[in-house]
Image (spheres, rainbow, N blue to C red):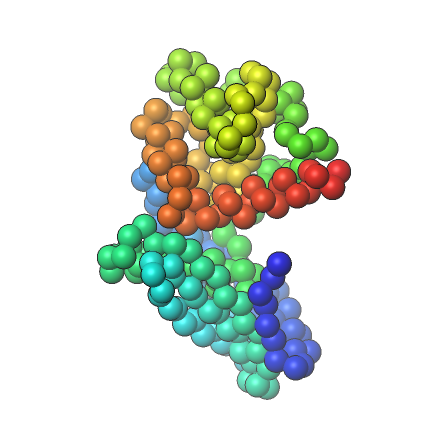
């Protein structure tokens, strides 16, 4: 459910935002994620892509963070010179209560709050769309169809053949905690779900499938998905939505 709130009228704001979005270019992927050997658009790049078009159309963005018991919240408000506004608040748990962890989480939320409300895209988003990935329709059953995978057997790391059974078993247990271990096909399907999520998450969208990573990178992913990180929070929402869509099919 969206937590978007608005002023009583937003007609002028909506018209101005539509014009601004028509002027925006994709943000440049100028940041590097050493964990997954991927790139992403930094906050500075996102602002560079959007600030000019927003200002020319009488729009501005205000972001206000808050912290309570290690959970960081961020309210992002898009305001128009008519006085109309829209606002959305998102949150994520910081890795710990230290100022560096909290600051990193605030920056993370600022990036995604800004992009979501204003409509900025980055080059990796466009690339995934062009390849037909990132918006794949959910499988028509509760678990994905393991045969529907055009990427199987491509770009595997030298460690993948030996590590694949363990990692796929982990993926099944991660997707279906508390259930008896699934069949080989069900483990493959769970791995595909994790892979599809990684293709949708900006920090890993262009990192390729885990089968192409070394063992250390896969272990880092397992650790980061256990909770208390932005990627774990993103997974929780993504997985809940995917299961709900499959249940309706």
Judge whether residue 74 can be spotted in this image.
yes
Residue 145 drawn at (x, y percent): 66, 25
Give coordinates of residue 51: x percent, y percent: 47, 70
Q: Quadrant of the C terminus?
A: top right
User: Which quarter of the figure has residue 106?
Assistant: bottom left
Q: Report the residue at 49% width, 28% height from top.
A: 173
Q: Is residue 130 visible?
A: no
Give the residue drawn at x 61%, y 46%.
241
Near-viewer residue (238 or 200): 238
Q: Could you tell me which quadrant the N terminus lies in?
A: bottom right
What residue do we see at 42% from left, 56% from top? Answer: 92
Write down the quadrant of residue 5 in the picture. Answer: bottom right
Q: In screen coordinates, is 207 left or right of 187?
A: left
Residue reaching furthest to the right: 249
> In the image as oriented, which residue stretches furthest toward the top?
162
Residue 193 locus on image (x, y percent)? 56, 33
Where residue 116 sits in the image (x, y, percent)?
A: 54, 60
| 140 vs 79, nearest the viewer | 140
Residue at image location 41% in from the left, 49% down from the top = 230
Left or right of 18 in this view: 204 = left
Determine the residue located farthest toward the bottom in the rendered image.
Answer: 82
* Above or below for 186 versus 71: above
Residue toward you, 94 or 20: 94
């Amino acid at each position: 459910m969206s937590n978007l709130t608005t002023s009583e009228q937003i007609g002028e704001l909506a018209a101005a935002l539509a014009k601004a979005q028509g002027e925006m270019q994709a943000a440049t992927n100028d940041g590097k994620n050493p964990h997954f050997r991927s790139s992403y658009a930094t906050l500075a790049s996102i602002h560079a892509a959007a600030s000019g078009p927003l200002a020319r159309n009488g729009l501005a963005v205000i972001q206000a963070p808050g912290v309570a018991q290690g959970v960081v919240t961020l309210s992002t408000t898009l305001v128009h010179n008519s006085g109309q506004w829209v606002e959305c608040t998102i949150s994520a748990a910081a890795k710990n209560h230290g100022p560096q962890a909290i600051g990193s989480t605030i920056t993370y939320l600022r990036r995604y709050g800004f992009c979501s409300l204003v409509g900025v895209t980055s080059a990796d988003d466009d690339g995934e769309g062009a390849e037909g990935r990132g918006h794949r329709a959910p499988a028509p059953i509760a678990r994905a169809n393991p045969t529907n995978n055009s990427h199987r057997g491509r770009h595997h790391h030298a460690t993948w053949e030996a590590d694949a059974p363990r990692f796929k078993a982990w993926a099944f247990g991660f997707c279906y905690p508390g259930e008896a271990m699934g069949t080989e096909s069900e483990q493959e399907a769970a791995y595909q779900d994790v892979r599809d999520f990684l293709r949708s998450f900006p920090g890993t969208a262009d990192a390729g499938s885990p089968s192409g990573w070394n063992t250390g990178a896969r272990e880092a992913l397992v650790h980061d998905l256990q909770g208390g990180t932005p990627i774990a929070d993103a997974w929780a929402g993504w997985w809940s939505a995917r299961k709900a869509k499959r249940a309706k099919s």
